[in-house]
Image (cartoon, rainbow, N blue to C red):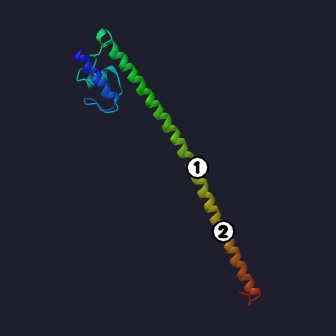
Amino acid sequence: MNLILEYFEALDRLKNNVPVNVPPNTKITKDSVALEAGRKKGSIKKSRKTFAKLIEAIAEASENQSNHKNMDIQKIKSLKNTVNHYRTLYEEASSREVMLIKRIFELESIISNEKKHLRLVDPERK
């Protein structure tokens, strides 16, 4: 039973993403649990009845890990869409700003020319 306990402890370390013998974020499989427990790949076999509960626990943990990854991928896609939306809003606002600054410059130029024209027509006006 001590051997099975070692495998379950290895599975818990993989679930908590604090493995000792394999890299962090390793996909949870029978082989990764075996390696984390300090055993060889393939040491957890369906044919051995003593591993039945362990194999079920590994399958459940693997499914949970996949669900978390899918949720993370969906969250990343959602955040990318939000970033793109705000980037578009920023670019539109920047374009408006540039257009308005250009229009202000044009209007100031027209006013300046009109003032010069008025001074030429009526030199006493300031």
81 over 110 or under it: above or below: above
43 over 106 or under it: above or below: above
| Few, some or many residues within 10 Å of mark 2 (<14, 14–19, 20+) | few
| Few, some or many residues within 10 Å of mark 1 (<14, 14–19, 20+) | few
Q: Residue 110 location in percent, x, y?
A: 70, 74
Q: Which residue lies furthest to the bottom in this view?
A: 124
Please give the name of the residue rendered at 61% of the width and 57% of the height, measured from the top-left corner: 95
Please give the name of the residue rendered at 74% of the width and 82% of the height, measured from the top-left corner: 117
Q: In which quarter of the image is residue 3?
A: top left
Q: Residue 60 location in percent, x, y?
A: 40, 20
Q: In which quarter of the image is residue 41?
A: top left
Please give the name of the residue rendered at 58% of the width and 49% of the height, measured from the top-left corner: 88
Mark 1 secondary-structure assignment: helix
74 over 89 or under it: above or below: above
Q: Which residue is disc 1 drawn over?
A: 88
The amino acid pointed to by label 1 is Thr
The amino acid pointed to by label 2 is Ile
Q: Tell me if residue 48 can be seen.
A: no
- Left or right? Give the position of 123 relative to 70: right
Of the pair 8 and 75, the residue shown nearer to us: 8
Q: Residue 83 location in percent, x, y?
A: 53, 46
Q: Estimate the spatial distance between the alpha carbons at disc 1 and disc 2, rounded to whole Å.
A: 24 Å
Of the pair 29 and 16, the residue shown nearer to us: 16
Q: Which residue is disc 2 drawn over?
A: 104
